[in-house]
Amino acid sequence: MSLRSPLGRVLGLGAAKEGVQHWWHQRVSAVALILLATWFVLSLLTLGELSYENVHAWMARPVNATFLVLLVITVLYHSQLGVQVVIEDYLARKGVKVASLIASQFIHIALGALAVIAVLRTVFGAAA
Amino acid sequence: MQSHSRSARPLSPHLQIYRWQYTMTLSILHRITGCAMSVGLVLFVYWLLSIADGPQSYERAMTFFAHPLVRVLLVGFSFAFFYHLANGIRHLVWDMGYGLERREARTSGWVAFLSAVAVTILFWIVVAVRHTGDIA
């Protein structure tokens, strides 16, 4: 049970009923991505030959795998937030809009799950 | 009645009659590059999956990525990334309340765009130098 008054709870939330949460999450994930994505680009450049052995060994190292998982989750979250705004801005018909929003969420979450599983399998190996 | 009430209201300028300024191009480019990269994430996840799936899948993926058309796409994605990064930092600085004066915003716009072009070129030069033997 919340101790906040009904008025206090809705103040500042505006017509979208969620206040600045979406905006703030977009900014925080952006800041995280400056670090994570720059790390990834520099890693790609310093990886050496992009052979299977090289890339697999790089990805299997715990620190790299951790940052990769963080990168994948953050980038897909940031992408979902951005695509959501674009859909809300340009799709006027309610049914199409809601369907697109749900589709976008499904696709982003599915891609995230696939990517995390891919990294984890590379770290922990799998029965061939 | 309806037409009267419409014409009586002030309208914000429509996009078609609004004088085009390159700051608008930079703004829409931020969205376009973001959307492009959202699509590009499919390729990124495909690459990760191919590594997890073993050498044959990885070879297949790398053959795909080596295709000239896909190469062009990758150059596009790399520019999208560097532009979105540079312009995104510009947005974050604005959010902190700095650089909002017209001259500052114009200058930072040029800096974001030109540095994105420069870093993209630099990136592919480094790739070319480091991986000359890769796909021979």
Image (tube, rainbow, N blue to C red):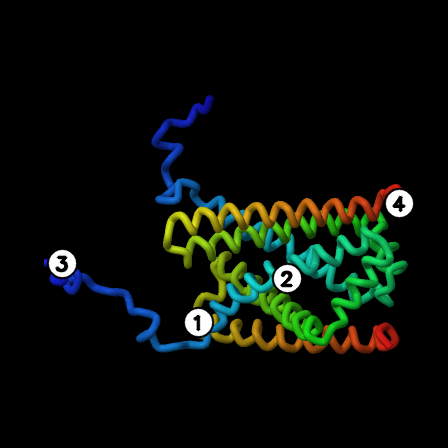
Which amino acid, by three-letter code, is at mark 4? Ala
* Residue beneath disc 4: A128
Residue B11, image quadrant: bottom left
Subunit under mark 4: A
Subunit under mark 2: B
Mark found first going from the N terminus, 1 or 2: 1
Q: CA distance from mark 2 to mark 3?
A: 47 Å
Q: CA distance from mark 1 to mark 2?
A: 24 Å
Q: Position of residue A72 (x, y in %)?
A: 68, 51
Which amino acid, by three-letter code, is at mark 2? Gly
Element under disc 2: helix
Mark found first going from the N terminus, 1 or 3: 3
Vertical order, A8 against B87 (above or below):
above
* Residue beneath disc 2: B40
Residue B10 visible to an observer of this rendering = yes
Residue B130, image quadrant: bottom right
* Residue beneath disc 3: B2
